[in-house]
Image (cartoon, rainbow, N blue to C red):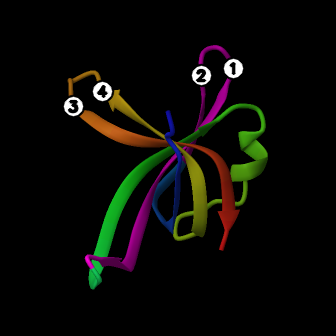
Amino acid sequence: MTNRIVLSGVITNGPIRKQSPAGIPHCHFVIEHRSEQLEAALPRQVYCRLPVVISGQGSQNKTQHLALGSNIKVSGFLAYQTSRNGAGKLVLHADDIIDI
């Protein structure tokens, strides 16, 4: 099964860097994407906001340059997360981040 996404956009929330109780570093932020895509041979304005998390020892090098307003391209997989209050959301779990 395939679960792979590449999305470019601007960081609108965060980045927030934390460490888990097990010592694993995590960086959380929100990316906002705006573009024009073709759908049924017609142009369509597209907008989305997506929470992103990147984890692991190598993540620190990939996120040290990130700041609010950074233009980036991020790739990874999507996973559904449920918060403590029961609200669910899709989160992009990144494995690569590139400045654009």
Mark 3 or mark 2, earlier in chain: 2
Q: Element at badge 2?
A: loop
Residue type, label 4: Ser
Residue placed most toward the observer, 75 or 57: 75
Instruction: Look at the image and tell me in which quarter the C terminus lies.
Output: bottom right
Q: Element at badge 4?
A: loop
Give the quadrant of residue 17: top right
> Start and end of the magenta stretch?
16-40
Q: CA distance from mark 3 to mark 2?
A: 22 Å
Tag 1 and tag 3, C-beta contact below 8 Å: no
Q: Is residue 20 magenta?
A: yes
Which residue is denoted by mark 3 in the rendering?
87
Q: CA distance from mark 4 to mark 1?
A: 21 Å
Q: Element at badge 3?
A: loop
Mark 4 or mark 2, earlier in chain: 2
Residue 65 in picture, x, y percent from top left: 71, 60
Q: CA distance from mark 4 to mark 2?
A: 16 Å
